[in-house]
Image: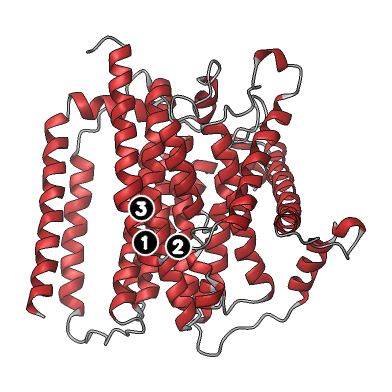
């Protein structure tokens, strides 16, 4: 075994990789803990309530207490559930959520894998979560969870198409699928300005990909009890919630990189602020936008949801691609 | 034989690929079959990564593990979701199948052995770096006619599927 590791990569580098992944996991867990806290606080303020304020100073330990409660709960499984798939589904849903973070460049130097096809990697892996969700819905052997799982899969697949299409404009402008190159290409002007149409389509489609308001039909409490994870409790349920919030982390990072210039400052004069602070600022803006939407928007109806994706967003994204292509060929003197 | 990390990864991935395919045949519940097929698809993507064809690997995940597995699951769930396969009778088919498999193996093995593999080009480093760009350029210059023909074929299949579905709707 020792020989084996020394041949291509040494033991210390492997340990370094593992340590890096663990550190990222801890950061993500910290983010999720306080994202949930701020979500409840912000929505509370918007609805003229106080929000959580009992556990710890200012209620800061509320989520910690909630997670501890979840982990101590009994792990129940319905009698007629499919045993193997019931256990497999949370893993299938969570593993890709964490794996997509591997290609996100947080700053110029702070990143993990520098993949040539970074943006495609993110989109391809996030598709596997749908498999986890649909498996969970089926394995629970419950009609509500099955409907929730099917709804979720239909929604996530439909909105994946405009999501990918809206990014094509940026890829055309940059000439690369690499996320770092995309940030470098935004030195002069952030992509949100020339690609505003793409940005609008992306934000809406991302909302549906994340299963968040106004597209939270898979988890419509009033119609489906809780959707695909209704039969899950304790640690397995925590895995699903975690996957959702980790995707929010990933999507926030992706929006920051694709449209908001990543770690670049808003003006070269503000260069003295470290890049990672810029990244966190832009990222937090997106996360706040999520909470704001949740407090504002009502839920869509299932049939409206589908026709909106195929008849509204997809043509818009195609128009955006056409406009970008015409502009680029005009610029390079082909027309 | 030299045992390196690549070899180990290849062994694990190919084992998963074959294992998924074998379980796909031996499972009796349809949903289990699709999930094990998903394992096969994912491991094939891993094999592509080992060959440094990142773009092909990602496309494999995007199209097969993502779209096709989910499409199959949808099809199963919308028809009868607790369907159990009756189980084909296995009697008296053993010898014939062994013969067919053996012949197929011989043909495939002979084909692989006798193919003159082109030696990797000198600019192998360049291939690794940007194979998405190179694939795109090749497809739209050298292979543009097969590419367009494939898209026409897919369009025909799409229209055909819609017509078939419409026909069934009219009959009801």
Circle on res. B136: none
Spot occupied by residue A37 in the image (x, y as percentages of width and height): 76, 57
Q: Residue at x 57, y 64 (%)?
A: A91
The residue singled out by tag 2 in the image is A300
The residue singled out by tag 3 in the image is A309
Spot occupied by residue B25 in the image (x, y as percentages of width and height): 31, 73
Crowd band around label 3 with a 10 angstrom C-alpha radius: few (<14), some (14–19), many (20+): many
Dot 3: what SS? helix
- Residue B124 vertical placement versus A160 (above, below): above
Kindly indicate whether the residue at mark 2 contacts the one at mark 1 (C-beta within 8 angstroms).
Answer: yes
Crowd band around label 1 with a 10 angstrom C-alpha radius: few (<14), some (14–19), many (20+): few
Q: CA distance from mark 1 to mark 2?
A: 7 Å
Dot 1: what SS? helix
Q: CA distance from mark 3 to mark 2?
A: 12 Å
Q: Residue at x 36, y 46 (%)?
A: A313
- Front-most of B112 and A224? A224
* Mark before the other along the chain sequence, 3 or 1: 1
Total marks placed: 3
Circle on res. A304: 1
Q: CA distance from mark 3 to mark 1?
A: 9 Å
């Amino acid at each position: 075994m020792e020989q084996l590791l020394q041949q291509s990569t040494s033991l210390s580098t492997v340990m370094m990789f593992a340590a890096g992944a663990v550190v990222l996991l801890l950061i993500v867990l910290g983010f999720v803990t306080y994202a949930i806290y701020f979500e409840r606080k912000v929505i509370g303020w918007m609805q003229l309530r106080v929000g959580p304020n009992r556990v710890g100073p200012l209620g800061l330990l509320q989520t910690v207490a909630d997670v501890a409660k979840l982990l101590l709960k009994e792990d129940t499984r319905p009698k007629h559930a499919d045993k193997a798939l019931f256990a497999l589904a949370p893993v299938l849903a969570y593993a890709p959520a964490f794996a997509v973070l591997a290609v996100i460049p947080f700053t110029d130097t702070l990143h993990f894998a520098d993949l040539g096809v970074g943006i495609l990697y993110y989109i391809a892996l996030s598709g596997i979560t749908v498999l986890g969700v649909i498996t969970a819905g089926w394995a629970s052997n419950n009609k509500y969870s099955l409907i929730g799982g099917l709804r979720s899969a239909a929604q996530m697949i439909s909105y994946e198409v405009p999501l990918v299409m809206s990014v094509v404009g940026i890829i055309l402008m940059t000439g690369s699928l690499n996320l770092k190159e995309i940030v470098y290409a935004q030195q002069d002007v952030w992509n949100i300005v020339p690609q505003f149409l793409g940005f609008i389509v992306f934000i809406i489609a991302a909302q549906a990909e994340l299963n968040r308001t106004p597209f939270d039909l898979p988890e419509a409490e009033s119609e489906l009890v809780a959707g695909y994870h209704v039969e899950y409790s304790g640690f397995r349920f925590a895995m699903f919630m975690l996957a959702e919030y980790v995707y929010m982390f990933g999507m926030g990072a992706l929006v920051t990189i694709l449209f908001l210039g990543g770690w670049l400052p808003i003006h070269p004069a503000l260069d003295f602020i470290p890049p990672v602070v810029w990244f966190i600022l832009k990222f937090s803006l997106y996360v706040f936008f999520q909470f704001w939407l949740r407090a504002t928007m009502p839920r869509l109806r299932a049939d409206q949801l589908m026709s909106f994706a195929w008849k509204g967003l997809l043509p818009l994204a195609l128009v955006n691609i056409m406009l970008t292509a015409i502009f680029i060929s005009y610029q390079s003197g082909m027309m | 034989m030299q045992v390196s990390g690549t070899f180990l990864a290849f062994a694990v991935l190919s084992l998963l690929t074959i294992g998924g395919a074998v379980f796909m045949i031996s499972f009796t519940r349809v949903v289990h079959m699709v999930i094990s097929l998903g394992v096969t698809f994912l491991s094939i993507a891993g094999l592509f990564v080992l060959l440094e064809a990142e773009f092909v690997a990602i496309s494999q995940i995007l199209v097969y593990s993502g779209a096709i597995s989910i499409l199959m699951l949808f099809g199963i769930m919308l028809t009868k979701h607790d369907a159990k396969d009756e189980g084909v009778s296995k009697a008296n088919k053993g010898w014939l199948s062994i013969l067919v498999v053996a012949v197929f193996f011989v043909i495939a093995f002979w084909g692989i052995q006798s193919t003159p593999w082109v030696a990797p080009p000198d600019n192998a480093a360049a291939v690794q770096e940007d194979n998405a760009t190179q694939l795109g350029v090749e497809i739209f210059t050298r292979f543009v006619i097969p590419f367009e023909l494939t898209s026409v074929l897919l369009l025909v299949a799409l229209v055909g599927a819609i017509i078939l579905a419409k026909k069934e709707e009219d009959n009801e």
